[in-house]
Image (spheres, rainbow, N blue to C red):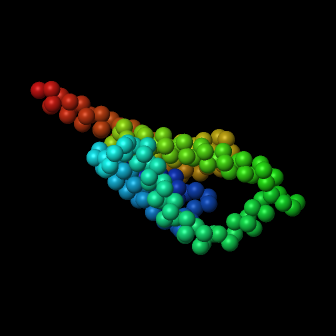
Amino acid sequence: SLLPIVAGVIVASVSELSFTWLGFGMAMVSNVAFTARNIFSKLNMNAPKGENMDALNLFAVLQLISTVLILPFMLLLEGSQIGAGWKAATTGAKAAMTASKLALTLGISGLFFQLYQEVAFLALNSVHPVTHAVANTMKRVVIIITSIFVFKNPITSANMSGSAIAIAGVLIYSLVKNHFDAKAKEKASS
């Protein structure tokens, strides 16, 4: 039941006007990392290691470890460009905004992303990792559809077909999961 979801997202993505194989490959690496994080996190949520290691504390520890691991790579690969990027965004005729507005925008964006990540982690604590992954996939389809209406992004028939296939896949997954959950409850009660 997961194949239609994956197929739909692939069709919708490959037909995107700005599609590149490098971007697709990086998205797949991100998906594998996201799924691995969720599986290992769920395992630790079910059998906490240490005192007070609930879902939020586990999330905080994971964030700290991730920051320590990724910061050297970020500084090595992009550190020299931060100052120039900031200057280009805030000064000159092509300035997008003032330095204080850029700082505020970055802060608000970071805050909302942090809140989103915390809510997603709490949701993971409440559902099966596959259900969480399906919801995350559906979120991406919703973002694509929303961008079409809000930003007037052009859409091809392949984009529409892929989104429809992914949505149908989520429906099939939900129906199959509910069917097997009901059978399991029926078996347990007999």
The residue located at (41%, 59%) in the rendering is 32
- Percent x, y of residue 189: 15, 26
How many circles with numbers are drawn on the protein?
Answer: 0
Pick whichever, 8 or 113, lies toward us. Answer: 113
- Percent x, y of residue 153: 66, 48
Q: Residue furthest top?
A: 189
- Percent x, y of residue 92: 87, 61
Position of residue 19 in the picture relative to residue 11 (left or right)? right
Position of residue 176 in the picture relative to residue 102 (left or right)? left
Pick whichever, 95 or 186, lies toward us. Answer: 95
- The answer to whether residue 53 is above or below residue 10 is above
Q: Residue furthest front?
A: 51
Quadrant containing the C terminus in the rendered view:
top left
Question: In the rendered image, is residue 157 in sight?
Answer: no
- The answer to whether residue 114 is above or below residue 20 is above
Pick whichever, 26 or 155, lies toward us. Answer: 26
The residue located at (48%, 59%) in the rendering is 66
- The answer to whether residue 106 is above or below residue 187 is below
The residue located at (69%, 65%) in the rendering is 82
- The answer to whether residue 80 is above or below residue 106 is below
